[in-house]
Amino acid sequence: MVIFVSTSFHANGLKLRPRLGRIRRSRILEQKDSNHGFETFFYNQTIDHFSYGPESYQTFPQRYVINSKFWGGGNSPILAFLGAEAPIDDNIQPSGFTYENAHQFKALIVILEHRYYGKSVPFGSRKAALKNARHRGYFNSAQALADYASILLHIKDKYNATHAPVIAIGASYGGELATWFRLKYPHVVIGSLASSAPILYYGDITPWTTYHSVVSKDFRDTSEECFQTIKKSWSEIDNIASKPDGLAILSKKFKTCTPLKNTTELKDGLDTVYSEAAQYDSPSNIPVKRICNAIENAPNCGDDILCKIAAGVVEAYLLEYDGNNSRCYINEDRTGDESDEGWEWQSCSEMVVPMGKDKNSMYQPEPWNLTKYIKDCKEQYGVSPRPSWVLTYYGGHDIKLILRRSTSNIIFSNGMRDPFSRGGVLENISDSIIALSTKHGSHCLDLDEAKKSDPDWLVQQRKTEVKIMQGWITQYYDDFKAINK
């Protein structure tokens, strides 16, 4: 089966942050024909864990997947991969960090689907649920964490594994959930591996310029010529657009799927191309370098800046679509993507990340405007975002002091080529709250399938993560024995 996933910066007039997901959004993912031991189950989940009105007791079927191939039985460990803003189908395959290391722990693998995604949709259908203001209100991270706690306790009971240590693993938004899960439900999980989890990208903790500054740095570090060409391209777009039939000229030059309605449509499309390339700039496919090479070596362009930029766009699409040349670019129809729809709501309710561009980046200045953001979200959904709620409910300020005093056993892994990394925890907080940062790493790279071509630093990062997790489990068993003498 082929699954198309995409990134959306601009939907229904809303300028939202990039989706976080572990997998590059516009890549075509080939699903495995065999389930390789994965079994699908549905848990009768409560719609509202935090109130006691009649509707709160309604339930919906929430999907989770189990693989017991490596499980040692009894109170052997459980590795729980927390689903994020996408169906869990993308994670049900014999690859990736969780599956490849389960044998070392003799662990039961559990993959949990986030409510309102995939097949875990309450109120009949996602479309109906998202249209209903009251039903949308149950779509948030706190409810999702409570879901995960309920399912994991159910699984432990079902498998007679009451005292099995559980480690939560999450990528990107899922990494944030893994962090918060350890904070809110320490009786359910003994530790968390949070890959590329930007828990400090909220409120005033991380400057709103950061994301696009890192994108710009990635391109500039790769090629000064490429950086400067992109920086000059925005005014050239405006210059051509100001001419008679300017938008038609731009549509033809960039081979857009539909005629451009304005320059914002084109600029947002280019922003997505560059941001995705930087965010997922792994050493195996080096998208930033490939795009820059295409820009610098574009044939028959001469001094035509936009001709060079268009060549970079083509290369980006060739990379993302596994070498299959797309017939059109930039504004292809991606309607109906459930992850885009769901993330739009989440970004307009609690996941409010200040994000803009300043003159020092390779973009035209576009300051963060919270007033406009709130206005746009309110027009779309009828309710205002809560920009400070994540920090109120989960914390974030004085993170070193708070986490040192309140929790233990968290690995924060980040690749510094990832623009979201600067909103992550980048320094050790205690002996058991560890930051593993890699200079050339990208978004959630450590949780990807291991390859023979992986550089030594990536191989070592994964080995370190496994060693730390093994230490948690050993300590858990020692504590359990000491308490139950």
Image (tube, rainbow, N blue to C red):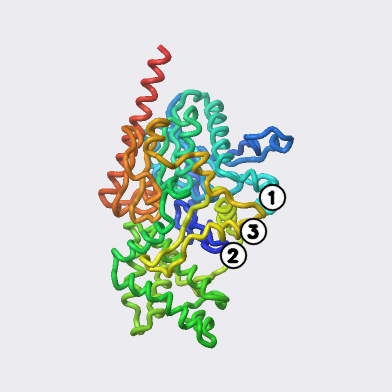
Residue 61, given in percent of the width and then of the height, sits at 64, 40
Q: Earlier in the sequence, mark 1 or mark 2?
A: 2
Seen as rendered, the residue at the extreme top is 485
Judging by the rendered image, the residue that carries numbered circle 2 is 13
Identify the amino acid type marked 3.
Gln
> What crowding class fits label 2: few (fewer than 14 Cα within 10 Å), some (14-19), or many (20 or more)?
few
Identify the amino acid type marked 1.
Ala
| Left or right: 278 as drawn, with respect to 385 | left
Q: Are marks 1 and 2 in contact (CB under 8 Å)?
A: no
Residue shown at 31% from the left, 32% from the top:
431
Q: Are marks 3 and 2 in contact (CB under 8 Å)?
A: yes
Examine the rendering and report whether any part of residue 294 can be seen: yes
Q: Nearer the viewer, residue 369 or 170?
A: 369
Q: Are marks 3 and 1 in contact (CB under 8 Å)?
A: no
How far apart, in angstroms, are the residues tagged by discs 1 and 2?
A: 19 Å
Q: Earlier in the sequence, mark 3 or mark 2?
A: 2
Identify the amino acid type marked 2.
Gly
Seen as rendered, the residue at the extreme right is 54
Judging by the rendered image, the residue that carries numbered circle 3 is 380
Residue shown at 38% from the left, 15% from the top:
482
Seen as rendered, the residue at the extreme left is 456
Judging by the rendered image, the residue that carries numbered circle 1 is 133
Residue 183, given in percent of the width and then of the height, sits at 47, 34
Residue 385, given in percent of the width and then of the height, sits at 58, 51
Seen as rendered, the residue at the extreme bottom is 244
How far apart, in angstroms, are the residues tagged by discs 3 and 1?
A: 11 Å
User: From what the image shows, is residue 285 above or below residue 81?
Assistant: below
Quadrant assignment, res 282: bottom left
